Amino acid sequence: MKKLSIIILSYNVKDKLLACLKSLPKHPDWEIIVPDNGSTDGSLEAVKQAFTTGGNIGFAAGNNVGIKKSVGEYVLLLNPDTIVYPNTIETVLKYMENHPQVGAATCRVELPDGTLDYSCHRGFPTPWGSLLHFLGLKKLSSYTSQNIPNVIHEIDALTGAFALIRRKAGEQVSWLDEDYFWNGEDIDFCCKIKEKGWKVMYVPDVKITHYKGSSVMATDETKKRWAENSTEVMGLFYKKHLAQKYPFFINWLVYTGIWMLRNLRTEWNSI
């Protein structure tokens, strides 16, 4: 068995994918698997290790294809539009090896301008937290990008852009839920492994850069799909994990808010 399997799901980001691969350290006990969701930009030809999933089957399903091919004790889900800096993977991997109760961990994820990609440090979307977000009052929540502690600590959910996962934890929850096509599967995954008693950790000692949204912006089809899907996953996650915890009136408010947001985003996308 390999120590680490790195899964990089690719979709129409050939140049960024090649840059990502070049940024990865070479290690005899690591393997790199590149599933491809039917790219049309020459990605398959550019990366000999890649294999096709037969079309764009989504983030969760595409990564699951790679995971099934992998043999590592740990699995790193890594976006193709990222640059990995020296010692980043090694540092997070060593932390997990030294803390057997940790099921998944991430590093600091920065956008190209050096600011934090908030998705690497998220809380679960409760009705109150979602309302604050919708009203533009995110600073009233427990964490914002301005006050996140710069020390290793436990979080609710990480990002699929860099998610180092203990195979044992992933197998306990059957990996990523393929009901999610795009977005939400990483939060869902973290919720499920936490229910099994695992911890999810944020390790800010090391970092990657994330050119966020490269696959989303690849084609007009993906832009439209994202606009529709980004709100659908809110309702899906709420139904799977939260609806049973709240009374009918709260659930009605949440679903109504999601419906309104979907209509707004659809209108913005059509302009």
Image: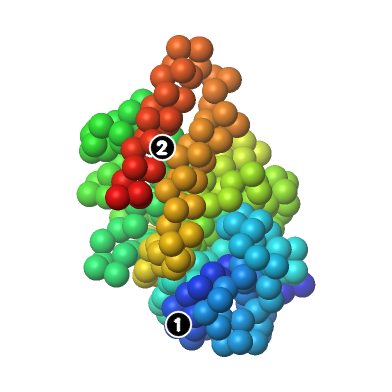
Tag 1: amino acid: Asp
Q: Position of residue 19 (x, y in %)?
A: 45, 83
Q: Position of residue 149 (x, y in %)?
A: 30, 50
Q: Taking 271 as reference, is 30 above or below it?
A: below
Marking on residue 202: none
Give the quadrant of the N terminus.
bottom right
Residue placed most toward the observer, 10 or 22: 10
Q: Secondary structure at mark 2?
A: helix
Q: Taking 95 as reference, is 190 above or below it?
A: above
Q: Which residue is rendered at x = 59% and y = 46% of the image?
A: 180
Q: Which residue is rendered at x = 51% and y = 41% of the image?
A: 233
Q: Secondary structure at mark 1?
A: helix
Q: Which residue is rendered at x = 25% and y = 32% of the image?
A: 135
Image position of 225 (left or right of 34): left
Q: Taking 62 as reference, is 264 above or below it?
A: above
Marking on residue 262: 2
Q: CA distance from mark 2 to mark 1?
A: 32 Å
Image position of 170 (left or right of 20): right
The quarter of the picture where residue 250 lies is top left
Which mark lies nearer to you, 2 or 1?
Answer: 2
Task: Confirm whether residue 171 shows in the render.
Answer: yes
Tag 2: amino acid: Arg
Q: Which label's residue is closer to the chain start, 2 or 1?
A: 1
The quarter of the picture where residue 266 lies is top left
Q: Position of residue 245 (x, y in %)?
A: 54, 19
Q: Which residue is mark 1?
A: 15
Farthest front residue in view: 271
